[in-house]
């Protein structure tokens, strides 16, 4: 059964006419007829709306149309780069920007909601409907900066990881924040004052440069990088905690980049799994599985995101 046949089947099960569906979608009844006869394909927004009308999932509506869809053959970096240049809404790149910025900043204490993050990305404005709601300017700046950071990361994703690259990540993230106005904060360079992550002691400022060089050398000597190697790098990076602030966000963008570079499905740690993520970092020496499982779960979530948007594109393109 093809897409057109399924649209007709579900429409009839809902006891609706082509005119009923057309009115909801804002199109002519003849358009629905063409959908059902496969003369034309509904666009992404129409597919979403049809699934809502029929009270089914998009997967149910699209099933079997992409039997040959194999996520292992998808070059995620190429897809993200191509969509970045297209500047269109409703695709994998667009939603990666929003989901990544919201969650990675929220883990670090940002008070912006996902809807506010989406609105900032799509309009470059922020609207708040709550009376007397106070918005932290740094939350807005770091959200905008993270959008830029993802774009920069995609541009250089294939390049070998270096200290200078990581410093640029930090500079992009923290530019124009209140921290950037503090001379001692050292935006885009290593920390001058000791810091810590939870109750874990991190590298002393005088040791950061050597520790980072050793970490980069250890990592870049690997011939076939696995997701476990990337996670291991992340743990070591966070324990060095090379920057005064922003280490978590820089560390997570590095993981995303290195997954793309090594043709591994990337992942975004969601704020709702923050406790599991921190537990994994704290207890990594005792049990690596906590953090690895959290990252693999995040990878599964991103795979679903890829399948959703790539399948939609395949349907629309034909």
Image (cartoon, grey):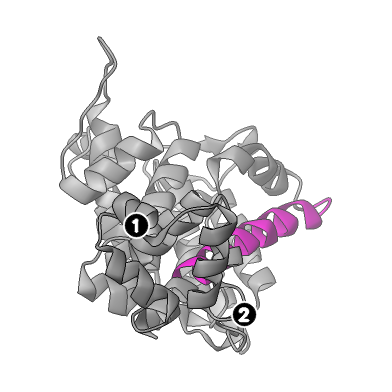
Q: At 20% across and 29% down in the image, what residue appears?
A: 127
317 or 137: nearer the viewer = 317
219 or 184: nearer the viewer = 219
277 or 38: nearer the viewer = 38
**Horizontally, is 29 left or right of 257 in the view?**
left
Q: At 52% across and 56% down in the image, what residue appears?
A: 268
Quick one: SS at disc 1?
A: helix
The CA distance from mark 1 to mark 2 is 27 Å
Residue 51 position, x and y percent, is 50, 56
Q: Quadrant of the C terminus?
A: bottom left
Residue 204 position, x and y percent, is 51, 45
Residue 1 position, x and y percent, is 61, 81
First in sequence: mark 1 vs mark 2:
1
Residue 114 position, x and y percent, is 39, 39
Binning the other alpha carbons within 10 Å of mark 1 as few (below 14), some (14 to 19) or many (20 upward) gives: some
Decide whether residue 92 is among the magenta residues: no
293 or 79: nearer the viewer = 79
Q: Is the magenta stretch mostly helix, strand or loop?
A: helix
**Horizontally, is 196 left or right of 179 in the view?**
right
Residue position marked by numbered label 2 in the rendering: 64
Q: Is 159 rendered above or below residue 305?
A: below
Q: In the rendered image, is residue 160 in sight? A: no
Question: Splitting the image into 4 quarters, where does residue 275 fall?
Answer: top right
Q: Which numbered circle lies on residue 19?
A: 1
Decide whether residue 305 is among the magenta residues: yes
Q: Give the range drawn in magenta.
A: 285-309
């Amino acid at each position: 059964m093809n897409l057109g046949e399924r649209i007709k089947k579900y429409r009839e099960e809902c006891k609706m006419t082509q005119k009923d569906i057309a009115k909801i979608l804002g199109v002519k009844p003849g358009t629905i007829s063409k959908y059902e006869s496969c003369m034309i394909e509904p666009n992404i927004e129409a597919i979403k709306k049809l699934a809502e009308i029929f009270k089914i999932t998009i997967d149910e509506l699209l099933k079997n149309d992409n039997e040959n869809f194999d996520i292992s053959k998808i070059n995620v970096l190429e897809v993200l780069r191509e969509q970045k240049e297209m500047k269109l809404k409703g695709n994998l790149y667009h939603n990666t920007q929003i989901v990544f910025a919201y969650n990675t900043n929220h883990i670090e204490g940002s008070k912006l909601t996902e809807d506010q993050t989406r609105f900032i990305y799509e309009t470059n404005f922020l609207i708040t409907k709550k009376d007397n709601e106070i918005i932290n300017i740094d939350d807005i700046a770091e959200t905008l900066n993270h959008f830029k950071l993802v774009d920069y990361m995609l541009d250089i994703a294939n390049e070998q990881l270096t200290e200078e690259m990581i410093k640029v990540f930090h500079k992009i993230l923290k530019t124009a924040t209140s921290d950037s106005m503090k001379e001692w904060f050292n935006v885009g360079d290593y920390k001058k004052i000791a810091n810590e992550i939870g109750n874990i002691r991190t590298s002393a400022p005088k040791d950061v440069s050597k520790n980072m060089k050793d970490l980069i050398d250890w990592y870049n000597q690997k011939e076939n990088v696995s997701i476990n190697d990337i996670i291991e790098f992340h743990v070591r990076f966070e324990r060095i905690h090379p920057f005064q602030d922003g280490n978590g966000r820089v560390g997570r963008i590095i993981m995303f980049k290195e997954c793309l570079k090594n043709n591994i499905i990337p992942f975004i740690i969601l704020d709702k799994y923050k406790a599991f993520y921190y537990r994994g970092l704290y207890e990594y020496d005792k049990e690596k599985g906590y953090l690895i499982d959290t990252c693999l779960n995040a990878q599964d979530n991103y795979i679903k995101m890829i399948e959703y948007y790539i399948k939609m594109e395949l349907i629309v393109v034909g």
